[in-house]
Structures are given as C-alpha cells and as structure tokens.
Amino acid sequence: MTYEMTINGKGVMSDRTIDVVNPATGETFATAPDCSREQLDHAVDSARAAFKTWKNMPIAERQAAVRKAADILAEHAGELSRLFTKEQGRPVDMAYGEIDGSASWMKAVAEMTPPVEVVEDSDAQFVETRYVPLGVICAIAPWNFPVNLAMWKVAPALVAGNTVVLKPSPFTPLCTLRIGQLFQKAFPPGVFNVITGGDDLGPMMTSHPGFAKISFTGSSATGKKVMESASKDLKRVTLELGGNDAAIVLPDVDLDEVAEKIFFGAFFNTAQICVATKRLYVHHSIYDDLRDRLAAIASATKVGDGSDQGTNLGPIQNKRQFERVMDLLDDAKNNGLTLLTGSDVPDNDGYFVPVTIVDNPPEQSRVVQEEAFGPILPMLKFDDIDDVIARANDSEYGLAGAVWSKDTDKAMDIARQIETGTVWINQNLTLRPDTPFGGHKHSGLGVENGMEGLLEYMQPQTVYLARG
C-alpha cells in the first residue's frame, strides 16, 4: 500500500522517504514520506486559508464533522489495528481498543461547546466574554499511543474552530497517514493535514511562523526545546511530558484482588505509558507477599510479537528506546540489584525486554530516579506514611500517582498530598474525555481533555457594548 501525506485535502508524496520498522522483528516493512520544507509551507498555507472559513462555520457543523470522522475511524478499526501492531508492536486486540476508543473519545469531545458568559446586561452596558479559535495548530503526537494521543489534539482543536497540521512520530507514521486519507471524507480541504518526516521535521514545525499553537506530547527534554522554539514568536503551547509515577500500597489491601491491577498498571503497553506506575512503594508488612504475586504474574505473561495469538505484551517500540531500557537494566545488574524476571522473550532481532521487577533497590539508584519507559518496575519498602509521601514527591516529575487501600478516607488524604496532575485510588490508567489531564513540575504545561483542554485551543474575547 502507498502511504501519502494529506495536504489541502489531497494525497501528497515526497521525493524522500523514511523507513518504518516492525519492532517485533527489527526489519523495515514500509516507508513513509519525508516532508520537505516546501511541503510544510504548503500544509500551513492551506490550513491558514481553510481557517478563514472553518472558524466561521457554526460550531454544530464542526461538531458534526468531528463525529463523522469518528465514525470513519471506528469503521476502519479492524484494518488500522493490524497496521498499528506492525508499526507499534502492541497486540492486535489492544491496538483495536485504542483505535475504537479514540473514535469514542472524539465523539465525546464533539459534544463539548465552549461557554459564553454574560458578565453584565444592564441599561448602562452589555458585557460578554466568549472564546475564539487561535488559528493553525501544530500537533505533534508520540509513538506509544499514536492514534489516541493524536486524536486528543485533533478533536478539540477542530471543534474549537482551528485547523490542524498533525505530525506523528517517525517511528509510527503509517496509521496516522491512513487516517489522514480517510478523514478527507470528513473535513474540507486544508482543515486537517497530516505530514510525516524524520527528526528534522519537528523543529521545522515548532519554529514555523504560521502556527498559532503547538500541542506536543513527548519527553520532558524535547518539551523544553519545543517551548524554547515557540517562545521566539510567542506561540501558545501545551506540553504533555514525562513522568516517574509513584504508587503507594497500604497494608490493608486485599492482595488477591489488587495484584493483577497493580501489575498491568505498571506493565500495560510494555510499560510505555507516561502515567504507568514506575515506582511501587509497598508497606513492609505485605511487601514480600505482593512481590511474589507480581513475580508470578510476570512469569505467566507472554511477551512476543503482537500479531501472534495469546501475546500479552509486545516489544519496545523502537531501537533507540530499547537501548535506553537495556542500559538501565545493565546498570541495575552492575550495581548488584536483585532482579526478578518474568517469562522468556523471543530470541530474534526484535526489541524485546523481559518483564523485570527490581527488589527493593536503593532510593537513589538509577532504576528508581529515572523514567524507564519500559518493563522495569522498582518495588520499594516503606514503614511511615509521611516518609513515603515525601519519597513519592521527591521527583522533578509530577504526572500521575496512585494509592491502594481499603480505607478510602486515608487514601484520599494521601492522594491530596501527592504532587501530580492525576491521582488514582484503587485503580489506575483511567482517563476520561470530560476531565482535565496535565502534569505538575517537569511533567508538562497546560492541560488536555475536559472543557479546560478545549479552551486551551481558544482565547477569551470580552466585548463591551455601551447603552444609552
């Protein structure tokens, strides 16, 4: 199949291409266009031209267009899920869940309407505050949830009246290119554009003067570069960045009930989730029992090619990240830490890492202090509640956290002291389109989702009308 970019409602190829690698084999199986500067200019110019009409379209019509796109996405979920697995690595049924779930998410966003506030309506004057779109949005999505996190940006941006140029990760461009082709039936030319390219394309986009806002999901290090680039012409930014999320397990939990939930809160998507549990603090009285249960689950979890039936966890998505994870494992081994590993991984050129639990490492070890973004979970003992809250908060990150306890009042008290944008109690990885999601500290700037997320794609305008 030929994968084309979508610019001004048409399929566009490029003179150059980038390779797309199947992470389960380490082999190139397709190519994607490598967008040129001229093609980027064309995409931005097309989006700016379309903005003049799109922003004035009644919001009900924009919402209907987003719902139509969601229906198209759901209709093609089967086709897209197989492609998703080849380029991203996640098992097919879970890939299907992301694509179908993204369609549902878009429909929920399409029900949102920005508020209009009448501040005063008197004989003297009428004062109204409303929200207006920004212009052309630069949307940059990551490789760990390439469809879902792209639609988090696209749906609210379009409902708000902006137009979009979307760039997926160079590691996972194909599903997004195909979605661009499919959405040509939902949106007028220029409203939704998809371009792909290598490492040079992102900086070209963030420095482009034609964008009004950048919405970026990725690492904190890259997010700082995006913010620096945007500052030159005061672009708005939303940055959803890294996390080193802590979970606290109190001694009153039912281990048989929570062990599997805790395990998959840490390892789902091969732990390539910004809000996955990455530091697990467990009360000393139940530590050994929970550790043994998690190790048993790890041993029963099949790691392999996501296209094979029965696979639970796929490979690390790309070689660069695979090498980072292996370096972290090597550091743990070289420092004599105790590693409990799960089932065997395929012996081929794919980017497979065994599920690994690190048994009570020192707090200052790299495996605790750094975000692995791979299947390595440090378990750490605690005795005192105040001490463990301080340890959980002792991080430059503040994306998400979790508390596990039967005593919900105590859990709520702990949750309110955790310095993160999201805290779960007796659950994890639960997100909703109607609630804001964002990070504290180095985990981000601004929010996505909810009415707050929609308004990040708009700016307030207050109109004063004198009477009499």
Image (cartoon, rainbow, N blue to C red):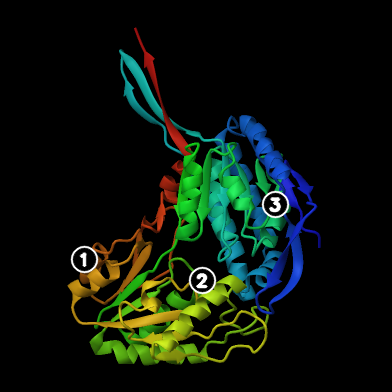
Query: Which circle, 2 or 1, is nearer the viewer?
Result: 2
From the viewer's side, name the closer residue of 124 and 139: 139
Disc 3 vs disc 1: Cβ atoms closer than 8 Å? no
Cα separation, mark 3 vs mark 2, equals 25 Å
Image position of 66 with respect to 265: above or below? above
Name the disc covering residue 272, or none. 2
Disc 3 vs disc 2: Cβ atoms closer than 8 Å? no
Disc 2 vs disc 1: Cβ atoms closer than 8 Å? no
Point out residue 175 in the picture as x, y percentages from the top left corner: 68, 61
> Is the residue marked by circle 2 packed among few (<14), some (14-19), or many (20+) residues within 10 Å?
many
Please name the residue shown 68% across and 44% down the image: 40
Cα separation, mark 3 vs mark 1, equals 45 Å
Point out residue 99 in the picture as x, y percentages from the top left corner: 61, 63
Cα separation, mark 2 vs mark 1, equals 29 Å
Q: Amino acid at mark 1?
A: Asp
Residue 16 quadrant? bottom right
Q: Find numbered disc 1 in the image and state the secondary structure of the residue it sits on.
A: helix
For the question of whether residue 456 can be seen, the reply is yes
Q: Find numbered disc 2 in the image and state the secondary structure of the residue it sits on.
A: loop
Name the disc covering residue 180, or none. 3
Quarter of the image where the N terminus is located = bottom right
Residue at the disc numbered 1 = 413
Q: Earlier in the sequence, mark 3 or mark 2?
A: 3
Please name the residue shown 56% across and 62% down the image: 101
Q: Earlier in the sequence, mark 3 or mark 1?
A: 3
